[in-house]
Amino acid sequence: MTLVREIKPGVFSIGAIDWDRRLFDALIALPDGTSYNSYLVRGKNKIALIDAVDSTMADVLIENLNALGIKKIDYIIVQHAEQDHTGSLGRLVELYPDSTVAGSARCLELLVEFGLVDKKRTQELKDGDVIDLGGKSLQIISAPWVHWPDTILSYLAADRILFSCDFLGSHLATSTLYADEAVVYRAAKRYYAEIMMPFRQHIRKHLERISNYDIDIIAPSHGPIHARPEFILNAYGEWASDEVKNQVVLPFVSMHGSTKAMTDYIADALIARGIEVKRFDLTNSDIGLLAEALVDASTIVIGTPTMLSGAHPLALYAAILANALRPKTRYASIIGSYGWGGKMLEQITQAMPNLKLQLFDPVVAKGYPKEADFRRLDRLADEILAKHRELMHAQSATK
């Protein structure tokens, strides 16, 4: 069944909704599915297709093109070479033999290396280049590192539409073409956390740059379209800023109950001091929600027992994940227990070299925590409170 929806006269959404996909990159959970958005822009003289969907949905894209009666495509604009944007490219260049595949130099290099297109069929697009379709022109905006080095955005000035690639998108399967902001906010934040957050500095630069464009619609490559651009732009501005919130993220794992007792105690101690706590039992938590929690938090406290002389692998994974995502978190500590010794603390701290964190003294108990250990947790909670107050005051003073 075809699904062609007109955004503006001559501008169509012709991508595919993937209701059932539950894992992306063999890592990222998709509790709400996703979409692979592809857009067709038809000018008076020429036609451009923007992005080419995942290979699993190639038939859907081709059916949508057929439903529009498209016999010729002049430009296939590849904004980003990742497979969910290029999965049907091989079939498209066969179906439309006169088409030119256009993208950034790095993107085209990747497409040729992947065997998706002959270099003779390509056209390099540079920042500021304009593709004139006749009455409609696409201006190219170079946007490397949101989230690959090859990314470009495409701006359709006549209709004030920004085709934003992965930037400003969300993994969300929905029947609505335009974003329900109450629904899409969490999906967009999770998407930012898992995919965009490591490139926060680049995102800030690109947000500033696109603020110079008149934009009525933002059409990303995943998730619904934004008919009120300020919603998603403001959200990204907040997430990518240096400001943090009075929050502690508390991922933990416990084998015999000792670390859990310490985790529960410090969670209650922090809450009693007016600090919001986001607690994650790593044996059954959605890692995407942990990533989302890291977007705003001032502090991360990792709870782990000692296992075979080192940190529990799940706790170490949480540290590695935080290191990869590079949140703006300012402070960290470690709590947990041990039996006969080991290198738990060293492993956790060495797993987070990318984070510029101030480390509070760890609280590690031998066996089940004793009264003295709980008092040390109280002192840790006091230290966190003092630093949070100092930080919140400094942030308020700069507003």
Image (spheres, rainbow, N blue to C red):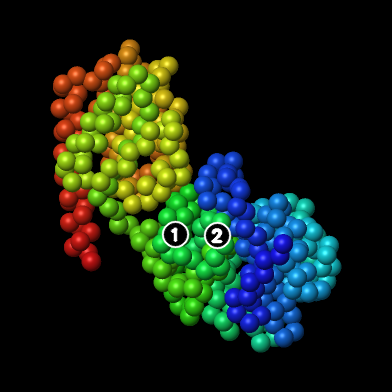
First in sequence, mark 1 or 2: give its number: 2
Q: Where is residue 32 drawn, in percent x and y?
A: 52, 51
The N terminus appears in which quarter of the rendering?
A: bottom right
Residue 190 appears anywhere in the view: yes
Disc 2 marks a residue whose amino acid type is: Thr
Quarter occupied by residue 380: top left
Q: Where is residue 301 drawn, in percent x and y?
A: 30, 36
Q: Is 209 situated above or below 84?
A: below
Residue 123 appears anywhere in the view: no
Q: Where is residue 77 drawn, in percent x and y?
A: 68, 68
What residue is rendered at 56% in x and 67% in y? 177
- Classify mark 2: residues with Cα within 10 Å, few (<14), some (14-19) or many (20+): many
Farthest residue, direction top: 340
- Left or right of 221: which side holds 228? left
The C terminus appears in which quarter of the rendering?
A: bottom left
- Left or right of 366: which side holds 69? right
Mark drawn on residue 183: 1
The one of 266 and 227 positioned closer to us in this rendering? 227
Q: Where is residue 101 drawn, in percent x and y?
A: 74, 66
Disc 1 marks a residue whose amino acid type is: Val
What residue is rendered at 20% in x and 57% in y? 394
Tell me the element at label 2. Answer: loop
Quarter occupied by residue 15: bottom right
- Left or right of 132: which side holds 350? left
Q: Are marks 1 and 2 in contact (CB under 8 Å)?
A: yes
Residue position marked by numbered label 2 in the rendering: 174
User: Label 1, label 2: how many angstroms apart (C-alpha)?
Assistant: 10 Å
Q: Is 170 situated above or below 300?
A: below
